[in-house]
Image (spheres, rainbow, N blue to C red):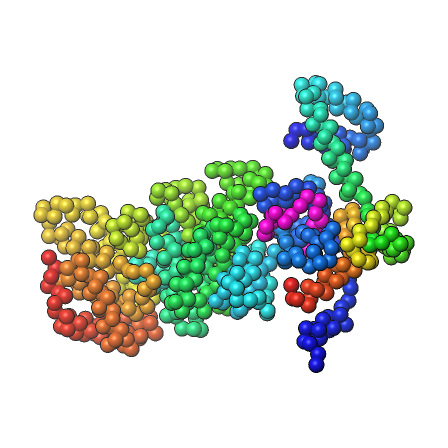
């Protein structure tokens, strides 16, 4: 828990504009002062987790069933992407053949699923009354 | 000839309008013991339902095999995510899974179709009698009715149990706690009360909801069989959250039950709801709270354990005429340990309810059943709902029994007692026998009044104490057969008129003459 708190503090310090090198040096000094230098490896691991989580949170991924569908999909999500205030170039693309067709845009806490798989599943659920 | 299934599919395809809406999502970061930590979902609200997306990264055929949707209930809103409880099998949740926000508060289906059915805490049928078709969704968490919307309790809820209807009467809209050690007959009283509602006219008969929390499945199955056999399932709903169900469902079950009841109350109907039992719900809530890392308080229960029960029991009410005049009567059950009613949860619920019926293991073991300790049992609002007929025959009963309990200790010095004390003890002994009642045999109001009238007029004075239950049984059978129609007047008018007293005296005399062998055997 404590390591998590130090890692959070380090993350937020860097987010506020402090240079990473300086922030880490300050954290090191702080841990020495608090007599908690043994926590440093755990703080490092917690920091990695936070960084990964934040990266996932800000990433936007456009999934398509086939690579050749990418261009058409990007065209379809253009408006959505601008609404999410993301540069079109920042949208990552991935291929998920389970989608069958269509596209799926996920990121920044939003999901738009326009895949054939989702539509077929909805159809199936309507038919069997699930 | 077209296949109807193909027809249905064609219709679905023709009318299918694909939607690609943007929905709010989060991601599972940790899962364990039925609790899920979700990153994101910054717009989630308390008690919101979230759906776990199990079909991602699966082929269409595998996605179609996923059995039903898996939902969670948001209970903690944190700085960078939420914590939710899984309403189902938490083994189906995996780290990294997408969680969709639904924007709706947890609701359960309610409606006429629920009558006679056994459902789980989410309102899904578990009795194999098929799905529901036409239901209204009711929010599980709803604010209790306000002061203006309520009116005072004035209509009795007959339990069919002499000891309760005469001395601890319950009114419609009241909250009366059933409290006692294990195996002291708490559930029996509740079930008898449900069974007794068949004696009520259909128009005013309460809808009964039995919420089984943390009970053995075998016990619930036995209760269902008993109610079916007694013809009581037609107006009863069973909400089952067995001991094998996740703690989340055990915590939710009472709220689901009362939400179902509110549907009927809003329509102006009366509802009787039994929570069997709230001790187990408190334990389930403690488990969830500790897993949600909420600070533990007394006995490791979370700080809001009182609020958990008060907000549940406050939903029992009798509504004003403007609001339809419906009511919810709650009979919560609390199990004590070694008769300790001063423990945390019992004292909490005692202070919330409008009275309590204490069941004593000692009385139960002595054969006094129902094992109600009349001295410490109380109904705070029920007396205003008691019929005049019952009041007239049971007026001094509680005091008489309390005095008898005081004098009981002197019974071993029987020879040295003065005449008045000896008489009081003899009368008390017979009254205790009269108030005994077998389970599954609730008595209609008019019969209770007749029996208590007889007891109050020294009818059993010449009967041997051990024979009193037999004589009472025969008397009830005699009155039912010979004077059933005349006695129905008591139920209709709610009073014992002078004419009725004459009828009762005549009936008792007739019975005495017809069965002389039962009397003059006091010793």
Range shown magenta: B81-103
- Does residue B262 appear anywhere in the picture? no
Residue A39 is one of the magenta-drawn residues: no
In-front residue for pair B436/B314 = B436
> Which residue is at the far front?
B1
Q: Residue B367 location in percent, x, y? A: 26, 53
The residue positioned 50% from the left and 50% from the top of the image is B244
Q: Is residue B134 left or right of residue B358?
A: right
The residue positioned 50% from the left and 65% from the top of the image is B117
| Residue B61: quadrant of the picture | bottom right
Q: Residue B237 location in percent, x, y? A: 48, 63
In-front residue for pair B180/B90 = B90
In this picture, is B246 found above or below B262?
Answer: above
Count every numbered label the image shows and give the total: 0
The residue positioned 48% from the left and 37% from the top of the image is B298
In this picture, is B494 found above or below B65?
Answer: below
> Which residue is at the far left?
B415
Q: Is residue B120 left or right of residue B468?
A: right
- Quadrant location of the N terminus of chain B in the rendered image: bottom right
- Does residue B341 appear anywhere in the picture? yes
| Residue B480: quadrant of the picture | bottom left
Residue B87 is one of the magenta-drawn residues: yes
- Quadrant location of the C terminus of chain B in the rendered image: bottom left
Q: Is residue B388 left or right of residue B509?
A: right
> Which residue is at the far bottom?
B1
Q: Residue B64 location in percent, x, y? A: 69, 59
Q: Residue B359 location in percent, x, y? A: 33, 51
Q: Is residue B56 left or right of residue B498?
A: right
């Amino acid at each position: 828990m404590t390591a998590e708190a130090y890692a959070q503090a380090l993350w937020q310090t860097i987010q506020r504009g402090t240079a990473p090198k300086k922030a880490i040096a300050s954290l090191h000094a702080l841990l020495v002062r608090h007599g908690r230098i043994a926590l440093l490896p755990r703080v490092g691991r917690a920091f990695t987790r936070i960084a990964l989580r934040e990266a996932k949170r800000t990433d936007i991924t456009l999934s398509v069933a086939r690579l050749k569908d990418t261009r058409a999909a990007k065209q379809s999500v253009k408006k959505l992407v601008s609404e999410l205030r993301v540069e079109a170039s920042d949208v990552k693309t991935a291929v998920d053949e389970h989608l069958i067709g269509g596209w799926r845009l996920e990121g920044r806490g939003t999901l738009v699923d326009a895949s054939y798989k989702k539509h077929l599943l909805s159809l199936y659920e309507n038919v069997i009354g699930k | 000839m077209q296949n109807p299934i193909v027809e249905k599919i064609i219709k679905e395809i023709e009318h299918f309008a694909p939607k690609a809406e943007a929905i709010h999502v989060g991601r599972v970061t940790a899962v364990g013991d039925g609790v899920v930590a979700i990153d994101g979902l910054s717009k989630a609200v308390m008690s919101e339902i979230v759906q776990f997306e199990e079909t991602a990264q699966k082929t269409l055929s595998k996605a179609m095999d996923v059995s039903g949707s898996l939902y969670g209930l948001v209970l903690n809103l944190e700085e960078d995510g939420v914590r939710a409880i899984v309403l189902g099998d938490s083994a189906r949740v995996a780290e990294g899974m997408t969680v969709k926000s639904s924007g709706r508060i947890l609701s359960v289906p309610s409606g006429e179709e629920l009558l006679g059915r056994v459902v789980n805490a989410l309102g899904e049928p578990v009795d194999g009698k098929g799905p529901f078709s036409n239901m209204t969704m009711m929010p599980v968490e709803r604010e209790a009715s306000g002061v203006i919307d309520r009116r005072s309790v004035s209509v009795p809820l007959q339990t069919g149990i002499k000891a309760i209807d005469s001395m601890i009467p319950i009114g419609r809209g009241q909250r009366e706690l059933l409290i006692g050690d294990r195996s002291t007959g708490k559930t029996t009283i509740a079930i008898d009360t449900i069974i007794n509602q068949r004696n009520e006219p259909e128009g005013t008969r309460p809808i009964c909801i039995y919420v089984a929390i943390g009970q053995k499945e075998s016990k619930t199955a036995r209760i269902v069989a008993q109610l079916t056999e007694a013809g009581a399932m037609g107006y009863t709903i069973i909400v089952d959250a067995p001991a094998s169900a996740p703690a989340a469902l055990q915590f939710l079950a009472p709220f689901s039950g009362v939400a179902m009841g509110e549907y009927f109350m809003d329509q102006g109907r009366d509802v009787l709801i039994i929570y069997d039992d709230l001790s187990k719900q408190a334990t389930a809530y403690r488990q969830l709270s500790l897993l949600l890392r909420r600070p533990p308080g007394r006995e490791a229960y979370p700080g809001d354990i009182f609020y958990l029960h008060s907000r549940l029991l406050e939903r029992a009410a009798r509504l004003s005429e403007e609001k339809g005049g419906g009511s919810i009567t709650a009979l919560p059950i609390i199990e004590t340990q070694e008769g300790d009613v001063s423990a945390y949860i019992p004292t909490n619920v005692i202070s919330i309810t409008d009275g309590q019926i204490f069941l004593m293991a000692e009385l139960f073991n002595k054969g006094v059943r129902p094992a109600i300790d009349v001295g410490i049992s109380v109904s705070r609002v029920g007396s205003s709902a008691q019929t005049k007929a019952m009041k007239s025959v049971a007026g001094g009963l509680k005091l008489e029994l309390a005095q008898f309990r005081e004098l009981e200790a002197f019974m071993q010095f029987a020879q040295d007692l003065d005449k008045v004390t000896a008489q009081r003890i003899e009368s008390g002994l017979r009254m205790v026998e009269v108030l005994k009642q077998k389970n599954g045999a609730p008595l209609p109001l008019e019969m209770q009044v007749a029996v208590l009238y007889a007891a109050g007029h020294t009818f059993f004075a010449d009967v041997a104490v051990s024979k009193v239950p037999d004589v009472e049984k025969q008397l009830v059978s005699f009155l039912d057969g010979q004077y059933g129609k005349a006695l129905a007047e008591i139920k209709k008018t709610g009073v014992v008129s002078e004419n009725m007293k004459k009828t009762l005296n005549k009936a008792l005399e007739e019975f005495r003459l017809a069965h002389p062998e039962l009397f003059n055997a006091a010793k």
